[in-house]
Amino acid sequence: MIAWEPPKGIARLAGVDEVGRGPLAGDVVTAAVILPLDHQIIGLDDSKKLSERQRENVYTDIIGQADCWAIGRASVAEIDRFNILQATMMAMRRAVLGLFLKPDYVVVDGNRLPQWEYAGEAIVKGDGRVDVISAASILAKVIRDAEMKALDSDFPGYGFSANKGYGTPQHLEALDRMGPTKIHRRSFAPVRRGATFEQSPLFD
């Protein structure tokens, strides 16, 4: 994999990543992180390559060592109104705006930058190449997973603790049987194919 180095003279490098573009339910969650240049965090990597326990251990180290970090999100309503790509860009912008230290340069996982005033670049597969993006990936993943587990008790039967809102067979079967809830993304085709929202007792 091609190594990435920040531009010379950058003191505050922020990394940004998202979790939750693909699920049928729940918000899309982003994180922005600025790490000290001499951080001692071990195990930073693409959050998808780590086990749940590994993510949680590294999460604790990130929180303890980061110069600052912030979470941004876009709601289900915003996803349905603007589409998932635009909602993700909104969430990324909110995360960076939430940092109490202004970054000199912002690197984002993927191939597209939000429209903002910050200097920076998008890096394909950056969550496995750049430590601050890896840190953002892990923060967003741990936080969103915890939220989906909590929502499982509010909306039982869909398997949110296990599937985190993704379209697993159990989740799709529950959609067909019980209909969507208020945290389902109505603009996503598998949700539209489920029962109507008026029929769902969990939509109100």
Image (cartoon, rainbow, N blue to C red):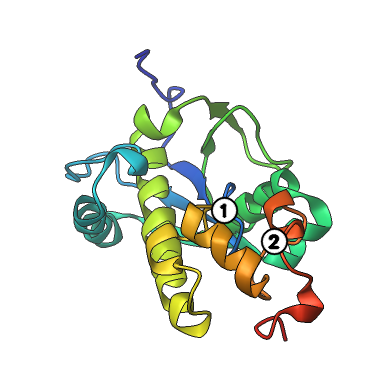
Total numbered labels placed on residues in the image? 2
Q: Nearer the viewer, residue 157 or 163?
A: 157
**119 relative to 143, above or below:** above
User: Which residue sits at x=52%, y=54%?
Assistant: 166
Q: Which residue is mark 1?
A: 23
Classify mark 1: residues with Cα within 10 Å, few (<14), some (14-19) or many (20+). some
Q: Secondary structure at mark 1?
A: loop
Name which residue type carries label 2: Arg
Quadrant into which the C terminus falls:
bottom right
Q: Which residue is mark 2?
A: 185
Q: Nearer the viewer, residue 190 or 75?
A: 190
Classify mark 2: residues with Cα within 10 Å, few (<14), some (14-19) or many (20+). many
User: Which residue sits at x=64%, y=40%?
Assistant: 118
Q: Relative to residue 200, is residue 41 drawn left or right? A: left
Q: Nearer the viewer, residue 77 or 67?
A: 77
Residue 100 visible from this viewpoint = no
Q: x and y percent of residue 53 in the render? A: 19, 56
Measured in 3D between alpha carbons, the distance from the residue under mark 1 to the one under mark 2, in whole angstroms, is: 8 Å
Q: x and y percent of residue 120 in the render? A: 58, 32
User: Which residue sits at x=42%, y=48%?
Assistant: 136
Q: Which mark is residue 134?
A: none
User: Which residue sits at x=26%, y=52%?
Assistant: 55
Q: Nearer the viewer, residue 101 or 33?
A: 33
Q: x and y percent of residue 203 in the render? A: 70, 81
Name which residue type carries label 1: Pro
Q: Secondary structure at mark 2?
A: loop
Q: Relative to residue 54, is residue 2 drawn left or right? A: right
Q: x and y percent of residue 195 in the render? A: 74, 68
